[in-house]
Amino acid sequence: MAKRFFYVSAAMLCLALAYHLGAHNAVAQSGMVIVGSFDQDSDPCAAESGQLWILDKMTRQNKGPFPLPSSAPITSITADFVGDDFNASVLFENGDAYFHDLSIHSWYYIGNVLNLYPTGSARSSWGLVKARYR
């Protein structure tokens, strides 16, 4: 019995020592997340922390930064440079979709692709659920 108590005590001491030596040094790692797009039909672009940069393929010059309409994380982005302005579309992680129109020189909200229709739900009792699967 004493041997078992010793092993339990030694294990708790080792856990306490490991926590004391290492837990206060644990920190989260953070870094920039850059979302970009590059295909044959559009200009290469990159977005990070609410800013958009575009590489004009015709002049080979970087254009930007241009402010994005939201600071939410970006899922997808595409852009085309035309003259001194650009057309771009951006989809944010929360489902909001925006388009930058060349004719009005600003972003406009298209809609939210995740919340198009409400999800219907019906309340069921436990008895109904059991009866369905018998």
Image: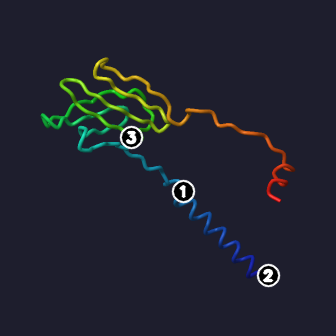
Tell me: residue 10, above or below residue 128. below
- Residue drawn at x 84%, y 45% is 125
Mark 2 residue element: loop
- The three-letter code of the residue at mark 1 reads Ala
User: Which of pointers 3 and 1 lies earlier in the amino acid sequence?
Assistant: 1
- The three-letter code of the residue at mark 3 reads Ser
Front residue (pair 83, 21) = 83
Is 125 left, or right, of 14 in this rendering?
A: right
Tell me: residue 132, above or below residue 76. below
Q: CA distance from mark 3 to mark 2?
A: 63 Å
Mark 1–mark 2 contact, CB under 8 Å?
no
Of the residues tagged 3 and 1, which is closer to the observer? 3
Tell me: residue 77, above or below residue 108. below
Residue 33 percent across, percent down from the top left: 37, 44
Residue 23: mark in rendering: 1
Say few, some or many: other residues with alpha carbon within 10 Å of mark 2 (under 14 / 14 to 19 / 20 or more): few
Tell how many labels: 3
Of the residues tagged 3 and 2, which is closer to the observer? 3
- Residue drawn at x 21%, y 37% is 55
Place residue 120 in its image quadrant: top right
Q: Which residue is mark 2?
A: 1
Mark 3 residue element: strand
Is 53 left, or right, of 58 in this rendering?
A: right
Place residue 115 in its image quadrant: top right
Residue 36 percent across, percent down from the top left: 32, 42
- Residue drawn at x 31%, y 33% is 52
- Residue drawn at x 49%, y 54% is 26
| The C terminus, quarter of image | bottom right
Front residue (pair 21, 103) = 103
Q: Which residue is mark 3?
A: 76
Residue 45 percent across, percent down from the top left: 27, 38
